Amino acid sequence: MTARSFLSGLECRACCTTVEPDRLIGVCPTCGHTLLATYDLEGARAVLAPAGWTARPGGMWRYRELLPVRSADSVVTLGEPESPVLRLTLPDLAPDVDLWAKNDGALPTGAFKSREMSVALSRARELGARAVFLPSTGNAAVAAAAYGARARMEVRVYLTEDSAPELAATCRAFGAHVRTVRGTISDARAAALDQEPGRGSVELSTMREPYRLEGTKTMAFEVFDRFGADGLPDVIVYPTGGGLGLAGMFKAFTELRALGWIEAIPRLIAVQAAECAPLVRALRDGSPRAEAWPGPIEFLGGLTVPAPFASERVLEAVRWSGGAGVAVPSARIHATERLVARTTGIVSGFEGAATFAALPAILKEGLVRPGERVMLYLTGGGISVAIPRLAERAEAPGLPTRS
Amino acid sequence: MTARSFLSGLECRACCTTVEPDRLIGVCPTCGHTLLATYDLEGARAVLAPAGWTARPGGMWRYRELLPVRSADSVVTLGEPESPVLRLTLPDLAPDVDLWAKNDGALPTGAFKSREMSVALSRARELGARAVFLPSTGNAAVAAAAYGARARMEVRVYLTEDSAPELAATCRAFGAHVRTVRGTISDARAAALDQEPGRGSVELSTMREPYRLEGTKTMAFEVFDRFGADGLPDVIVYPTGGGLGLAGMFKAFTELRALGWIEAIPRLIAVQAAECAPLVRALRDGSPRAEAWPGPIEFLGGLTVPAPFASERVLEAVRWSGGAGVAVPSARIHATERLVARTTGIVSGFEGAATFAALPAILKEGLVRPGERVMLYLTGGGISVAIPRLAERAEAPGLPTRS
């Protein structure tokens, strides 16, 4: 990897503070909002071409000029492939639509969180971090643990108690320190902030450091790479918890537009479970930010984020793209997950199933027009339950014998 | 997909019978041995170039000229990505070796079986099959079920009783019919042969139809595609149950040599668990075929194949490549699996861990020389345990609530 990153700085969209990027930093030192990475897009435009990306081996590090890691030696990778893109024919669910799915279940930790943690841990290591921590409902923790093992960095995760126990075991198998916390992901973060000071560790919570967002940009780069400017989906339907992926995809498409490579940005549709839909409510109400969703809330995997941080960035991504928000009852999502497996062979996970389940409402509300190209973004969430069997075996006195 | 397949026929290496390929067929009609697909390699050579493959989107269908499916419309795909390739530094396990791993855990059903079933079901559908069946220890059944759902074909699997119960649930979630059978995979096949006649179903047992083998060729094509002729691994270490992957990779490298694209073929090293090592024993004894391994045998996942069919094809692949066989005690494989997760972030599975566990013996026996490039082939086996949670939810009266 000889191409260089065109990272030029960090900026706060809330208060316009700019920050020199080559030191460890979390949120804006002035106002505490999210810092976003900026790039020398003029410089990149002079040397970059889409064909140059396509000529490289597939996967997210193909796009290294628009990722924030300075040195090839810093890259922490588990060999992320380009995630699969599939055309689907589901006349019952979505007639008259040119329907596609992109499935991040193929990524090394079975979910799109691989993208975030590959970039965030690469950059943290590059800037001198030796230990990281984060609160999580599950998949982000597994990804941090796996990439931490690859990077030989210390990882401490604060998991919500309702997360599948397999996720904790998986994190431990990767050598991470795990603490489970009663309550929501906000409570898990509070526990982390109570325990971590003095440990020299770096926080990797969603939107509270600049680089996980950069990793999610590669979802949009891959869509562009596969479909080209003329074939981009009209609409991308995205299962939304904290909304980092929406903000990242919108930033990526904006950068591609600044490079002159695309004209229109796909309309981004945020799907949440009706039982916890703070971003969808804010989109429908025209609010500038999402208010915390009142509890109690049933556990809905990665969609259980009642109080997303820096929701302004997510809401602007959806609005500026011309998109919208749609909420679907969780019972319908569960039923759809089974239907999807049986009729497509795809392991969508609960989160991915939400995008299928939202299709009838999306069509009914006219958010998609007949003949438009629609991409369901399946964020994954499967493989993480594999490792516990390994952990179980570690304790098992012997293996079953048969004749 | 406009490029055509150069499939020219089927041949039996045991009795030299040749068969017209464009009808449904299992084994050699003359002697009952495995039929192998042949290609018009002269014709392919005139129009194909490695750069032509590389220019296409990544993944196994990039190599369609040397796959047996005639029509693009027949292809049953879940969007298989090129599987990740990783460089590893493990001085304790393999000093002085240029060590790499290729991880098929990224494939849609979490294991290399996706390759086999994508090709076999495509071809079966193309030739008019509407239903298929197979015996399996697990991952092949999951792949058949997933691709069957995608193809809207009927799938019936006969699982060994010792297979993880999650595998049966996963197959059912994909809509497959599942029967569990006490005993080995041979017993499972006997049950299938008892039940299937009259159902109009096609058998997809290992080496008993020609096309799963063709799918495994894509492992070698991807290695060639990634490393180039000059950078090919000197040695590929492969976890071996029935050995289909070894026979397929050898066939692929032989085809690439016939095309004039490579000169040397990597030496193939078959790794088996010491508790069930019929192929390794035959390699060490110089036997032309593997004798059945005597029971009782503990369950060792995909490595539990005590009586591999058509072992001649596997043994010749290893021998003609200049390779060898190595057996490792299963206890050491289990311990290595944990070590691999903690030190690399890779979910190797038991089968993949066997290749790491074999490294000390491989080096001690001089099967690899210092400085040589060694690739561990990780066949996967993780994601299939994801779906059962979905199945559980189907029965669950409600979801946990929290405040």
Image (cartoon, coloured by chain):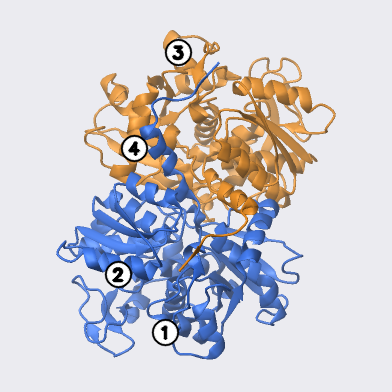
Chain colours: A blue, B orange
Looking at the image, residue A200 sits to the left or right of residue A186; the answer is left
Residue that badge 4 annotates = B338
- Image mark for residue A190: 2
Q: Is residue B380 visible?
A: yes
Q: CA distance from mark 4 to mark 1?
A: 42 Å
Label 4 residue SS: helix
Q: Nearer the viewer, mark 4 or mark 3?
A: 4
Residue B338 sits above or below residue A368 on the image: above
Which quadrant of the rendered structure holds the N terminus of chain A? bottom left
Label 1 residue SS: helix
At x 19% / y 65%, what residue is drawn? A127
Task: Mark 4 or mark 3: name the one nearer the start of the chain.
Answer: 3
Pointer 2 local density, CA inside 10 Å: few below 14, some 14–19, many at least 20:
some
At x 67% / y 71%, what residue is drawn? A359
Which quadrant of the rendered structure holds the C terminus of chain A? top right
Label 2 residue SS: helix
At x 33% / y 53%, what residue is drawn? A145
Q: Amino acid at mark 1?
A: Glu
> Does the residue at mark 2 contact the one at mark 1 (Cβ under 8 Å)?
no
Q: Amino acid at mark 4?
A: Arg
- Image mark for residue B320: none
Please state the chain letter of the residue tagged with numbered disc 2 in the rendered image.
A
Camera-nearest residue between B185 and A303: A303
What is the x, y in percent for residue A46?
35, 77
What is the x, y in percent for residue B169?
62, 42
Residue B261 sits above or below residue A367 on the image: above
Residue that badge 3 annotates = B281
Label 3 residue SS: helix
What is the x, y in percent for residue B269?
41, 25
Residue that badge 1 annotates = A312
Q: Amino acid at mark 3?
A: Arg
Looking at the image, residue B275 sits to the left or right of residue B292; the answer is left
